[in-house]
Structures are given as structure tokens and as C-alpha cells.
Image: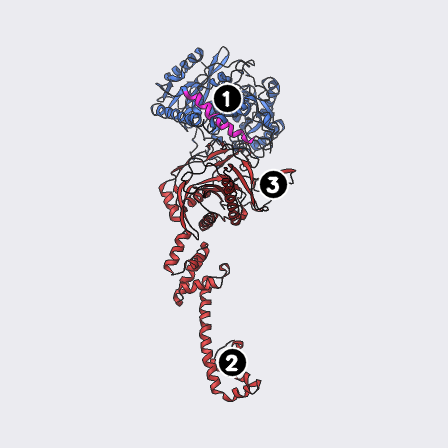
Chain colours: A red, B blue
Amino acid sequence: MDYKPVIGLEVHVELKTNSKMFCACSANYFGEKPNTHTCPVCLGLPGALPVPNKKAIEWCLMIGLALNCKVSQFSKFDRKNYFYPDLAKGYQISQYDMPFSKNGTISISTKSNNKEVLITRVHMEEDTGKLLHFANDFTLIDFNRSGVPLVEIVTEPEFESSEEVIAYLKNLQQIVRYLGVSNADMEKGEMRLEPNISLKKAGSKDLPKYKVEVKNINSFRFAEKAIDYEIKRQLEILKNGKTPAQETRGWDEKKQITVSQRQKEEANDYRYFPEPDIPPFKFEKDYIDKLIKSLPELPDAKLARFEKSYLLSQYDSEILTRDIQAGDFFEEAIRAGQSHNINAKQIANFLINRKIDLSTIEPARVIEEIILGQNITIEKKELDNIINKVIIENTKAVNDYKAGKQQSFMFLIGQVLKAARRKIDTDLIKKKLEEKLK
Amino acid sequence: MKLNELSIKQAKEGLRTKKFSSEELTRACLDEIKKRDKNLNAFITICENEALADAKKADKLLVEKRTGTLLGIPIALKDLYLTKGVKTTAASRVLSDYIPQYDATVVSKLKNAGAVIIGKTNCDAWAHGSSGENSDFGPTKNPLNEEYVPGGSSSGSAVSVAANMCLASTGTDTGGSIRLPASFCNVVGLKPTYGRVSRYGIIAMASSLDSIGHFTKTVEDSATFLEITAGKDLNDATTPEVKVDNYFEDINKGVKGLKIGIPKEYFIQGLDKKIKEKIEKIIKFYEKEGAEIVEISLPHTEYAIACYYIIQPSEVSSNLARYDGIRFGNDRSFFGDEAKRRIMLGTFTLSAGYYDAYYKKAMKVRTLIKEDFDKAFMKVDAILTPVSPTLPWKIGEKVNDPLKMYLSDIFTVTANLAGIPGLSIPIGFENGLPVGAQILGPSFSEKMLFRIGNCFEGSNQNGL
């Protein structure tokens, strides 16, 4: 019997706001000394209260809008109650039944197909602290990450391969980077993936009765390996006539396998209820319209426009829209090139073929270099003509050189320079002259 | 009259005219504490040295003619208010040694106003209780008759003012925890509008219900106190941008022309006859003063206690989750019976499969109760009710019957569910025990509550 993978994704994206989600502490915790970015709020001390970060909410809404979600007019935060030592308050402030936005789509393309993936919801929550385990002896808690704004993006279980998942992740990463709301670096934990993987009988419409959540994936490469491994593992179990257990597994990079972490006998009961410390939200249409207008041109739209307006190949367009800076640079160079009759294709070729580091150069300088490059080609043709002329007009010196008189060669170079009436690279003249006199 | 028996207003005048110093005033309070607190048990922590140092500082400032609304006035804080460097226990053994790292917003405001903090008062642990008997540090006794409860949960705060151990004190009111002990101890108690006073830095009981208020000897003092504590706090998202009124503007205006509603649902079978008679007398008083008395109906009142005892424990169960003993305080085995009861109740009502039947339904009822008040306040300016259905009871009388204990909040929980302000004023004695009346108004109508309360207080110094 044939089986088909069914994969749904929960992706957490950490926003790069200056301050945390519910307090004024710096949200930039990476590499900082433990527990230096903390206050009563993110430490969950008695009496402390959360005050929501407006910018973070706005960015969460922007991510939703960029993923074609519908923003909820009414929304609120909820408490997700569970106990874990890295969770300072004993509950996480999250969103339950009224996420900031829901029902979006994102298009992905792989070698074999293009498809639209449905986004279930995009909601806002806070990150937890971090447990640091020391050689089975003791565990310390670092609360620098506690309360850092996190956006959770949940998809419908519509992915059928690791290739599709990676395409989605890359797309999502590119979008949030375009929005400027997160660096979404998986290695730094700024983008975290929790896939739910199961297999269904090919042709069946029903979802499988189990699913396996995989954690501890912190790179695109691991994501691919972990998903592929898990599909293979589950397939073997199914082929033996058994059903894989509903559980949470972790990717073990050393062993290159997934390992069972927690069997989910029953679903967790998080006892969600509306967060009483934060009044509910009402988003006016004007505000949402303003946000929509403020969105930058997104990668897919930019790619299509580059192909169409600048007659670029898909490959070139992809490279030039990889990040928002590349596209901006390219288009600024186009504007600078207009008065010099340098076209988009020339600029694209120059940027791509020479692998120009855009951070070290100004677009106008790129145009200068292209013009200079053209001059060099013109000079080469001119140089040929001049050399030919000098050879014809100085037969004696030519013959002397051919007879072995090196001084005559230097004379001929001097004649070329004289005829050119400008500074030309003497090495180039030497090379050309030698070729012609062979 | 002894210094510690003065009101804030009187003491301020004495300090200003140099009749006495803040140090003398503070010492008078400390002496009273020494004399009576062994019996009354109103304080968990007495800040004698700090208070005297602050009083001396205040005296210096007074010499320099510097002002501060409470400059040199000794006050006490319910032990739910975080005080930087001073032990804060919530009257629970879980926090028996907890020393906060920051001051609650209200504590900062009071300090900035020059108040001398004389100590931290006893209360029902985590503010769970109506009698003051649930404290892990022993029950507080009623100073008017030590065999009786002072009312809770802000028991020690009410007692500290009633027994002249300080001139004012802070409390928290989640279901009546200020108004009930105020009425049991014959002092003025204010539960402000939800969000009028910042909750930041005050140990949460039930976050959507907690109101931050105070006890004073007079209505005017209550207004003085609220002028300091009220206002938007950037650290509390539930404090709205509503201007703080000048609470003294109308305070002597009387009640002429005001419509005062009497809700028939508050005059039920369980109401003590003597209390009913007293309330009828105060109604007559206001009528005589020119108020129009209107009978009104708040039809969902009978569901208030049930509704409250779902929402409140739900929030309690979540708010107490952080007290796990991992980073501060003692572990969970130190929770008392009442806290455990509420944690279990709240955990149950929020559980999957029960949420809709309990929490969600209770929230719907809460909306109905709110709407009852909205409708009523279209007809009347304020509502007058008893505070408690019974007179103070004897210590130990209800400890084994939590349900009976819960019912003592029957007339006060409605204001918390609706978020409206309530002022409890003493109106006289019955069998030597005090009786209080409650004046309720629309959100942010504290100014009018003071006006109505002050009208009675001004003409009835000896009660009814």
C-alpha cells in the first residue's frame, strides 16, 4: 500500500523589537550574560503586570497581512497555564481563540510543483526563559529570553515532503526579513520549526489518527533530514501493519535520528482563559488599511515585476530579490544608469556575474564601473588599430626586432603610446605587440 | 484627644501649625500598636525604625515649609503591597521571608506624598477570606470587641485605623475585602472603580476584580488619599486615561437633587432585621436632605455570588502558579487550606470540557450584572445598600462553613463584577457592633460617592 506524508507546521518567529513583549527590558538577549535583561515583569515576580508592546503587535499584524491573512477586528490575549521552570509566571501569555489574524495563504514552488499552502493563524505570544543543564548535576535558568515577542504561524497539514517544507520556510523567512521584523535566523533560534508529521493512505481524504511532533530543529538542513527520517521511520511501522505512536520526538543531530521525548497519551489541558491584565483589542479598519499601505513590496510580487519590467530571467530575478536590500540596490542602479544608457540587464549581469558585495559599494559606483568596463573594450579595439598602424609605419624597427634587437621593441611601444595620446597599460601594449610580431 | 486619634485632616493642620511633630504623631501610633497589637494582631511587620526615621525627615521638610499631601502622616499597608526591602508576605507562609525588590506604584506614590509607613498589616492569606481568620500568622481581632472578627480580607488594615494605630491604611477589594471590614470596624472604606488605582506591585488575587483602595477615619480623608493613589499607570495596562477628579469640589454640596436608588434585591430574607432598620433610617436621612429616593431593581443580583466564585478562583488558580518555591518563597506545601480550595476550584472550572459550563457562563452572567447597573444608573445617580447581611460574627463561628463565609460578600461582590466604585461608611451601632452602608456609583464617580458619604458623616457624628 502507498502512503503519503501529511505535514503541518508551527513556526515561531522571534521579533527584533528593541524591548520585550510586556516590559521595557531589552529583547536582544543573544550572547548576553544570563539574567541581565530582566525585571519584575519578565521574572514573573509577585505584583508585576504585563503591558503589551505596541510595535510587536503591529509587526505581528504585518506578518499576518503579508501572509494574506484576515486581521481580526476584535482580539485579546489569553493565558496558557502550564508548569515548567523556564516559565516565570506559571502561564504563558498567548492567544487562544481570537488570534490577531487567520486564514491566509502562501505560495511555494518546488522542482516538481507549485502550490498554495493555507495559513491557519498568526498569533502573538511571549518566549520563555532558557534552562541550562550542567552535567546532570543541576540546572540554571536564564530569563533574558523570557518575554521576548514571538509570533506563531500555524499552517494546515498540507505539506507532502521535506522539500515543500523547506520551500515554505525559505519563503516565510524571506517575507519576515522583507518586513524588517525579524532576522529569522534558525541557528540563533529566531525562527523555530515544529513540524507535525504523519502518513496517510494514498487517496484517503481523512487525516491520520496520530501525529508526531518533532522538536529541536535549528537549521534548514536539520529540518530536511528530520522530516525525511521521520517519514521513513513511520513508513516502516505502517508497512508492518502497526500505527506509529502519538508523541513528541526530538532530532538527534549526532545520531541523525529522531528520538522519542514525550508520549502524548492525552492532549495537554492548558486551561486557557482571557488574560485579565490586558484589555482586549479592537482594530479599526483605518488602522489596518494604513498597515496594509505600509507593507513593502513582497518577494513574490517583486520577483514577478523584475521579470516583467526588466526582462530578467527567473534565476536573475530570484537573486536580485533574495533580500530587500538587493532589490533596492538594483533599482537604484537602474535609475543611476538611465542617463548613461546602461540598461537593467547590463546591471543585473554585472551584479550577478561579478558577485558584487552590495554592502561595500554605492549603486552609482556600479554604473561608473560598467562604463569603465565599456571604455576598456573600446580601448582594446582602438589599440589594435594603433598597433597595426605603428607596425606598418615602422618596418625598419619591426625588422630589427625580428632580427633580435630588443631596443626596437621598446621603440615600438613608445610609438604606440604616442599615437594613442593617452595613458594605456604598457603590459597590455607589450602583450598585443608581441602577439602581432610573432 | 490623643494624637493617634486624629484624622488626616486634623493631623495635617496640627503639623502645619507646629502643635506637634510627625515624630510625636508617629510615636503615638507606635505606642498604640505596642499597647494593643499583641491582642489585635493587626500587623505582620512593624517598621518602627524606618517610620521614625521617615517622620524625622518629614519634620525637617515641614520646617522648610515643604508640602506633601501626606507629609508626616503615619499610614499602614496591607501586606499584599510590595515594599522594597521590607518583608511582604500576603499573610501566607509561602512568602514568610519574601523581601521585594521594588515598590508597588501606589507605595511609591504614597512615599512621594510624604507618608510615613508604619507597618504591614495582617490579612486573610492571599486576600482569601471575609473574616481575617485565614491569615497564616493568626487571626486579627475586632478592636471594638475582641471576641468578634474584624471582617476580611483587609482585616489588619481596617483594625489599624479603627484602633488608632495609624491614620489611614491601604487595602485590596476583590469581592468586598475593604468595604466589609470597614463596616465591621466602624471606619470609612473605599473600593475605587476598577482600574482607577494601579495594581502594579500588589500581589494579585483575581486580576479582573482586584480594586486598590483604602481605609480612613473620615470621608474627606478618603478623598485626600484617593487623590494621591488614583491615575493612569504605565505599568498597569488596565488603568485607563481618565482624568483624576478634584474630589473636594462637591464634597460639601449635600445630596439635594440627587437620585438615590434602593435595589429591592438587596433587602432579602437573609438580611439582619436590625441592619435593615438602620439602612431605612439612612434612607430617611437622605430623603430629608433633599435626595430623591427611587426603588430600583438589579435582577441578576442573586447570581452574583455563584458567578464570583467561578471567576475569582479561576483567576486565583492562575495567579498563584508562580509561587512554586523555585526562585523565591517556600514551596507549595506551605499554601493554606483556603488557597488550596480556590486553586482546585479554579483549576477545575477552567479545565477543558468544563470551561464553557462554568467560566464562560459566569462571564456571561457578569455581563448581565454589569448591564443591570448600567440600566440602573440611567435612572439614578447612586445606589444605597447594606454592606453586610449580618453584624460581625464571633471568631471561629464560620470557619468550618466556607459557603456561609462566602455569602457574607453577597452585597459587595456585585460592584467588583461590574467594576464600579463603592464607599462603605459607618452609620451606627447595633448591640455594640458597628453597621455600615454602601454607596455605589457608576464607574469613575468617586467624587459623587464622597459627596453623598460626607453629607451623612457631617450631620451624624454619633451615627444613627
Mark yes or no: residue A24 visible: no
Q: What residue does disc 3 label?
A: A132
Tell me what residue is drawn at x 61 percent, y 18 percent. B38
In magenta, the rendered stretch is B303-327
Mark yes or no: residue A387 visible: yes
Where residue B10 sits in the image (x, y, percent)?
Answer: 51, 24
Cα gap from disc 1 to disc 2, whole angstroms: 111 Å
State which quadrant residue B48 falls in.
Answer: top right
Q: Earlier in the sequence, mark 2 or mark 3?
A: 3
Badge 2 marks a residue whose secondary structure is helix
Marks 1 and 3: CB-CB under 8 Å? Answer: no
Where residue B295 sits in the image (x, y, percent)?
Answer: 35, 18
Three-letter code, disc 1: Lys
Q: Main secondary structure of the magenta part?
A: helix
Tell me what residue is drawn at x 54 percent, y 40 percent. A249
Where residue B434 sits in the image (x, y, percent)?
Answer: 49, 15
Cα gap from disc 2 to disc 3, whole angstroms: 71 Å
Total count of labels:
3
Q: Nearer the viewer, mark 1 or mark 3?
A: 3
Q: Could you classify mark 3 by the number of other residues whose Cα lies within 10 Å: few (under 14), some (14-19), or many (20 or more)? A: few
Marks 1 and 2: CB-CB under 8 Å? Answer: no
Badge 3 marks a residue whose secondary structure is strand
Q: Nearer the viewer, residue A365 or A348?
A: A348
Q: What chain letter is assigned to the residue under label 2? A: A
Badge 1 marks a residue whose secondary structure is loop
Is-magenta flag for residue A282?
no
Q: What residue does disc 2 label?
A: A433
Q: Residue B217 has which mark?
A: 1
State which quadrant residue B81 falls in.
Answer: top right
Q: Nearer the viewer, mark 1 or mark 2?
A: 2
Q: What chain letter is assigned to the residue under label 1? A: B
Up/down of A399 relative to B360, above or below: below
